[in-house]
Image (spheres, rainbow, N blue to C red):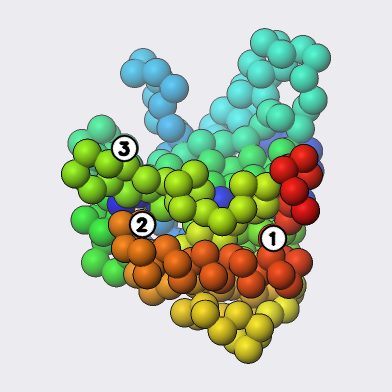
Amino acid sequence: MNIIISCQIVPRVLTAAETYDYSAGLIARLAAAHVGFQHWWSMLAKPTDTRIAFDDRARMTAWIQAGKDAFQLEYPNASLSLSGGVLLTNVTSEAEWLARGSISLSINPGPGNVRLEICRIEEVFPSPTELVWASLRALAYDSRAIVVNTNVQQGWGGERKLYSLHCGVFPHREFLGWMGYVDQPVDESQVPDAARVERHGRGTMIMATEDADLFNARSVEQMNRVEIRLAELGLLPVTDAHLGG
């Protein structure tokens, strides 16, 4: 099973140095979630690239600036908000990448999104549910967070499913998925089908089910019921007004 935690934040254009500082704060929170998230390196764009340790502030800031410059050169008419992010991994070799869950962390303050992806999570980590919950808490700590969701990709035999594509309720709204965060206070009585509800900062973390399984009808139904209730509460923003209210 692969999971993708996506955090939508208030967009803002940052300098390379500001992007580094913002990313450093996020990484410090992730490090508290799991020891494997303490150290990060730049993701290689091609085999001849050299990995840069995130802890090397000077080189990492220069790498971020180089990425901004290359983007603006290739797309001179594009908004500056679309450039200047970082793509990181927590390993330094291809062998480690495969063995430790092919983890990637994408941080893009300009367009306002942060994304943590972990592959084969149930094979690599002994407690996937607690790892995702702790990672969600780290990402949702950001005061600029608007909504966070956890997408699940799973295969069985020759069939593959992605929650948002094959199991979600609303094609025109944000989804919660396995677990997520909304930037409003919610209590357990308002979402009785949720497995966990925890106030966090100015908003609320919500886990739809303890064990996500896209090939288990009860598990999918529970995730769907939680999303329907959140939509009734006005907590799942519309993403495409043409498809419905």
Could you tell me if the residues under marks 1 and 2 are in contact, i.e. CB atoms within 8 Å?
no
Question: Which mark, by number, is residue 22?
Answer: none
Residue 152 is left or right of residue 126, and the answer is right
Q: Rounded to the nearest whole Å, what is the CA distance between mark 1 and mark 3? A: 38 Å
Which badge, 3 or 2, comes first in the chain's sequence?
3
Q: Position of residue 173 (x, y in %)?
A: 67, 52
The vertical placement of 116 against 218, above or below, is: above
Q: Considering the numbered disc 2 on the image, is that residue within a helix, a strand or a loop?
A: loop
- Report the mark closest to the observer, 3 or 2: 2
- Report the mark closest to the observer, 1 or 3: 1
Q: Residue at x 64, y 16 (%)?
A: 70
Residue 196 is left or right of residue 214, and the answer is right
Q: Residues within 10 Å of mark 3 (few under 14, many from 20)?
A: some
Q: Residue at x 77, y 12 (%)?
A: 76
Q: Residue under label 2, please give it.
A: 214
Q: Position of residue 45 (x, y in %)?
A: 44, 22
Q: Nearer the viewer, residue 39 or 134?
A: 134
Q: Residue under label 1, please give it.
A: 236
Amino acid type, mark 3: Thr
Q: Residue at x 34, y 18 (%)?
A: 47
Q: Rounded to the nearest whole Å, what is the CA distance between mark 3 and mark 2? A: 32 Å
Question: Which mark, by number, is residue 92?
Answer: 3
Q: Nearer the viewer, residue 195 or 39?
A: 195
The vertical placement of 129 against 78, above or below, is: below
Amino acid type, mark 1: Leu
Q: Position of residue 221 (x, y in %)?
A: 45, 67
